[in-house]
Image (spheres, rainbow, N blue to C red):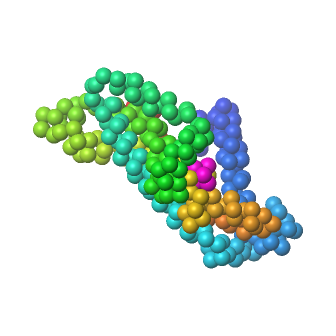
Amino acid sequence: MNARALQPGNMVKQAVLIIASFLALVPTIYMIVTALKSDEEYAVDKLGFPAAPVLENFRSVLVDSPFLHWMLNSAVLVAGSVILSTAVSVLGAYAIATMAFRGRDTLLGISTSLMAVPPVVMIVPLFVLYTRLGMVSTYSGAIIIYAGLITPFSVYLLTTFFRTVPRELYEAAHIDGAGQFTILMKVVLPLSMPALVTLVVVNSLYVWNDLLIAIIFLQDDAKRTLMAGISVFSGRYNNQVPLTMAGMVIASAPMFILYVMFQKQFIRGLMSGAIK
């Protein structure tokens, strides 16, 4: 350990970070530990570690409940909304970042300001509109809403990133005869993979964990999402806490795996804008 790390100021910072990390991990640790207990062991010791880990709770969640079906519904919404939002955001952000047209800054300002609008204020007009269009309890309707909610942030992030791409690359591509779409696909996007991965992870997490839109616009039980299903599941098994915690662990696993798979690109995407 070097001398700089042993300085009082750095040691205090490290201690604060360790404590903050521990506090952030406590709920996750409690959830996993509880999921590995039987009901009898949990009734005796609610905070301790299990004497012998039990996997029966996970089997019950996967076999005796529609958890996998709920996860599939959520996966459909995540894939559809993230793909749609990313496609629209890439095109919009590229136009705002590289093309000179009247109202460009105003358009970006309006798009960015939509990030401050809470989704709950749009529920009533959207529900009335969807009822008239017959789009309630449809995957396409929910995907459009989710894509609309996550697009303003996506446009803002990608516009900021695209503006950091050296202008010389655009000019060289123009000289070689490349059009705008070719420049976007073959020059800009390959350089923007960290930002795109960041968007995919953040937006997927938002859609996966959403409850409000899922409950109101997907009222058909066959199209119930994971978060909506968990709310029903936890109410039904209110007295079986280990079983409920096992369901929470399974629900958290896909997004955890997604982050682990792309964590390097995710961190690069978060850091690149600050560094540049």
Apparent side of residue 241 relative to residue 256 in the rendered image (left or right): right
Q: Nearer the viewer, residue 66 or 127?
A: 127
**Residue 216 can be seen, yes or no:** yes
Q: How many marks?
A: 0
Magenta stretch encompasses residue 49: no
Tell me if residue 125 comes above or below residue 164 in the rendering.
below
From the image, give the main secondary structure of the stretch colored magenta: helix
Q: Position of residue 202 (x, y in %)?
A: 50, 47
Q: Nearer the viewer, residue 268 or 76?
A: 76
Kindly give the residue lying farthest to the right in the view shown: 44
Tell me if residue 222 comes above or below residue 175 in the rendering.
below
Task: Please identify the quadrant where the N terminus is shown.
Answer: top right
Q: Position of residue 105 (x, y in %)?
A: 38, 24
Apparent side of residue 31 relative to residue 156 in the rendered image (left or right): right
- Residue at image x 61%, y 54%? 215
Quadrant of the image occupied by residue 172: top left
Q: Nearer the viewer, residue 36 or 78?
A: 78
Q: Which stretch did the figure color magenta?
A: 212-216
- Residue at image x 56%, y 34%? 117
Q: Position of residue 125 (x, y in %)?
A: 55, 40
- Residue at image x 44%, y 41%? 151
**Residue 50 can be seen, yes or no:** no
Apparent side of residue 256 relative to residue 231 in the rendered image (left or right): left
Q: Nearer the viewer, residue 201 or 72?
A: 72
Quadrant of the image occupied by residue 231: bottom right
Task: Please identify the quadrant where the C terminus is shown.
Answer: top left
Q: Position of residue 252 (x, y in %)?
A: 60, 59
- Residue at image x 59%, y 42%? 124
Tell me if residue 232 comes above or below residue 134 in the rendering.
below
